[in-house]
Image (cartoon, grey):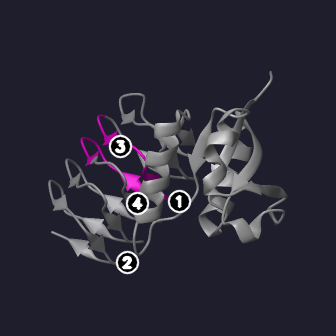
């Protein structure tokens, strides 16, 4: 089966993890990475940085699929801006799901979201656009994660929690059921 081509927008540390997920998923062929101008020609895990953000329109002529591979810790401003730019150009921004993750068939995952290794997304959960559901994150039943959120490694969102747009939810954080979460939640927090 011929794989569809995809480009990665962002060549930093988060890109390393997403590359691994894409390789494991075995659905797309990575044709290159978009990063800052000074990194053009360099390689990230064997994949070449082929262009910078200013070149996205010309890249679209040869590759219609893209994924945002910039992380979200202190701010998601750049990640969000590049998602919106790629969307405006017309890129298809598929959901990328590790084959090592569990995603209920009764859940809804929207475009440009990446589900990392060993994440669990249970029944009736909804995850918005351009989110990172990181390694070993647990999203329980009836949870809503709005757009542009990062649910960090080994964190827990218990039943019927609502995570508001642009939230960063730190590693090993745990929430009480039915909580509403917004903003920056540091690692190890308990949200009640």
Q: Earlier in the sequence, mark 4 or mark 1?
A: 1
Which residues are drawn in magenta?
124-144
Give the percent coordinates (x, y) of residue 29: 76, 38
Q: Provide the residue designation for mark 3.
A: 127
Using a 10 Å C-alpha cutoff, classify the residue at mark 4 as few (fewer than 14 neighbours), some (14 to 19) or many (20 or more): many
Q: Which residue is mark 2?
A: 187
- Residue 137 showing in the rendered view: no
Q: Nearer the viewer, mark 3 or mark 1?
A: 3
Q: Position of residue 50 (x, y in %)?
A: 78, 54
| Residue in the image at 42% along x and 55% along y | 80
Q: Is residue 132 magenta?
A: yes
- Alpha carbon separation for disc pair 3 and 1: 15 Å
Percent across and percent down for residue 126 are 31, 39
Horizontal side, residue 34 vs residue 184: left or right: right
What distance separates the C-alpha of mark 3 from that of mark 2? 21 Å
The mark that comes first in sequence, 3 or 2, is 3
Callout 3: SS? strand
In the picture, the disc for residue 150 is 4
**Rounded to the nearest whole Å, what is the CA distance between mark 4 and mark 3?**
11 Å
- Indicate whether residue 149 is drawn in magenta: no
């Amino acid at each position: 089966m011929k794989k569809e081509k995809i480009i990665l927008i962002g060549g930093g540390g988060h890109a390393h993890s997403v590359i691994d997920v894409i390789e494991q998923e075995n659905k797309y062929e990575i044709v290159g990475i978009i990063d800052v101008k000074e990194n053009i020609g360099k390689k990230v895990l064997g994949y070449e940085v082929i262009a910078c953000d200013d070149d996205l329109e010309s890249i679209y002529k040869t590759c219609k699929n893209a994924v945002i591979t910039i992380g979200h810790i202190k701010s998601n401003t750049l990640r969000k801006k590049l998602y919106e730019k790629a969307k405006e150009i017309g890129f298809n921004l598929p959901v990328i799901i590790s084959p090592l993750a569990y995603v209920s068939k009764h859940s809804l995952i929207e475009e440009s979201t990446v589900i990392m290794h060993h994440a669990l997304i249970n029944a009736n959960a909804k995850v918005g656009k351009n989110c990172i559901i990181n390694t070993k994150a647990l999203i329980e039943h009836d949870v809503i994660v709005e757009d542009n959120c990062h649910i960090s490694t080994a964190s827990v969102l218990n039943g019927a929690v609502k995570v508001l747009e642009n939230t960063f939810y730190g590693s090993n954080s745990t929430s009480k059921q039915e909580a509403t979460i917004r903003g920056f939640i540091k690692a190890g927090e308990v949200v009640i």
